[in-house]
Image (tube, rainbow, N blue to C red):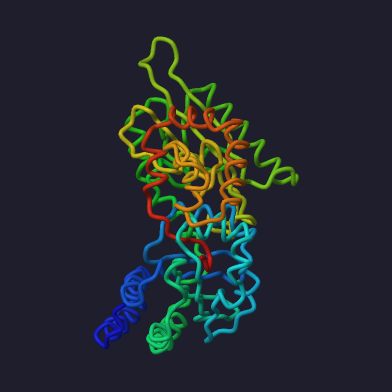
């Protein structure tokens, strides 16, 4: 830790830089992370009028984990009720409410937090009023323990300045169609991803997706419209419409992925492109992608030079990041007990994750699963094991 006066003064200067540029909060969070250490630092805000996640940034975070929390794990997070009831200007330490016995049996901790290297969360509301709630969270690993007293004292000296800067710059923390949290996360993914309306109009194509358009003839942009070969295009739009109908009729919750494998036609240069897509429902994504349903479309192109990360396993089979890591270790021949030890979770947690993996991949036994994984791009499985595991999502830790 670096809790020196020089570090304190640097943090003060960075805090007031945020009044000119909202992006400067990233520098503040990185400075605080260098000062107190731990797993990660997270600043997030919720717009009061729309009830949406309106700001999310941090130090040592990862977009795919943020997305996983938003799309799935927010629904079983036992800390949410605590965060809602917490008073401004005071620290909430989740380990004081959830002891080790609770953590050992809780699916949120065992399936999401612990595999991502987080156990302890200390969080403070910097602002809570009729416009927005702004929260600052510090996440720490299981072996690190909670924030030590000297780190808390350092942060308490800084807190009045952060509160003042957050209040003065509150307009930067309310909902804006031009600064959506989900769009920023998609932009940072290595996997080619597009966000589209259910009519096929492109709202956002990240850099990896834009590069992909130059490597395949099977997906192109015509202005702001995605163009696929006619038969596939019609099928894609039909499935998008079906997803929206299911969502509006209450038959689906917007978390299922559909698959769209495409091949070039006779007489054309051989080409293959795989699409995996789901519907993002505002009510189930904290409004992170806007206030209307959008389609999130992942691409995998075997012939492209794109790096493939664990998002492929999520897109192809709906595996969580934690399940992807279990699958990767299985592919390396690690027994279930060894996987539990390596990931720092309970053996029963890994066993339940394996059952979930079987269901999602339509396999029944480990050899079957391993054969399937070995036929995916190697880097997808290896990267799922090698990637750092920052925590994300509102108050994750």
> Residue 116's spot in the image, x, y percent?
47, 57
* Residue farthest to the left, as pictured: 6
The correct choice, above or below, for 319 with respect to 361 in the image is below
Give residue 86's quadrant in the image.
bottom right
Give residue 16's quadrant in the image.
bottom left
Which residue is at the front of the view, 63 or 201? Answer: 63
Which residue is at the front of the view, 284 or 221? Answer: 284
Q: How many marks?
A: 0
Q: Which of the image's four quarters has the N terminus?
A: bottom left
> Residue 303's spot in the image, x, y percent?
34, 27
Give residue 358's quadrant in the image.
top right
Tell whether 39 sits left or right of 17: right
Q: Residue at x 37, y 45 (%)?
A: 190
The correct choice, above or below, for 105 with respect to 128 in the image is above
> Residue 293's spot in the image, x, y percent?
60, 49
The correct choice, above or below, for 211 with respect to 23 in the image is above
Which residue is at the front of the view, 73 or 295? Answer: 73
Which residue is at the front of the view, 294 or 336? Answer: 336
> Residue 376's spot in the image, x, y percent?
43, 31
Q: Residue at x 32, y 84 (%)?
A: 12
* Residue farthest to the top, as pictured: 267
Q: Residue at x 53, y 86 (%)?
A: 90
């Amino acid at each position: 830790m670096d809790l020196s006066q020089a570090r304190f003064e640097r943090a003060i200067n960075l805090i007031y830089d945020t009044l000119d540029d909202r992006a400067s909060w990233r520098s503040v969070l990185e400075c605080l992370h260098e000062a107190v250490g731990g797993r990660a630092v997270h600043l997030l805000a919720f717009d009061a009028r729309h009830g949406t996640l309106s700001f999310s940034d941090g130090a040592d975070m990862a977009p795919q984990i943020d997305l996983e929390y938003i799309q799935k794990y927010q629904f079983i997070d036992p800390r949410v009720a605590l965060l809602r009831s917490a008073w401004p200007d005071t620290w909430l330490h989740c380990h004081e409410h959830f002891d080790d016995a609770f953590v050992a049996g809780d699916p949120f901790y065992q399936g999401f937090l612990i595999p991502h290297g987080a156990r302890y969360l200390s969080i403070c509301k910097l602002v809570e009023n009729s416009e927005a709630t702004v929260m600052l969270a510090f996440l720490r690993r299981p072996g690190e323990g909670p924030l030590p007293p000297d780190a808390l004292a350092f942060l308490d000296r800084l807190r009045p300045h952060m509160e003042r800067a957050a209040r003065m710059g509150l307009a930067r923390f309310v909902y804006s169609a031009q600064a959506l949290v989900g769009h920023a996360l998609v932009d940072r993914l290595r996997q080619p991803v597009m966000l589209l309306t259910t009519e096929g109009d492109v709202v956002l194509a990240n850099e990896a997706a834009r590069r992909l358009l130059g490597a395949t003839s099977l997906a192109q942009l015509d202005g702001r419209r995605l163009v696929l070969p006619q038969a596939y295009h019609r099928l894609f739009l039909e499935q998008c419409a079906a997803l929206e109908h299911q969502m509006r009729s209450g038959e689906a919750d917007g978390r299922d992925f559909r698959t769209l494998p495409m091949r070039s036609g006779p007489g054309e240069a051989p080409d293959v492109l795989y699409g995996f897509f789901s519907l993002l429902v505002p009510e189930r994504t904290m409004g992170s992608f806007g206030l209307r349903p959008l389609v999130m479309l992942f691409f995998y192109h075997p012939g492209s030079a794109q790096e493939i990360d664990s998002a492929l396993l999520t897109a192809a089979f709906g595996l969580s990041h934690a399940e992807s890591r279990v699958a990767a270790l299985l592919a390396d021949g690690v027994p279930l007990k060894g996987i539990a030890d390596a990931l720092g979770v309970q053996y029963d947690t890994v066993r339940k994750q394996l059952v979930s993996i079987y269901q999602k991949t339509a396999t029944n036994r480990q050899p079957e699963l391993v054969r399937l994984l070995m036929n995916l791009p190697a880097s997808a499985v290896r990267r799922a094991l090698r990637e750092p595991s920052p925590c994300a999502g509102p108050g994750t830790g």
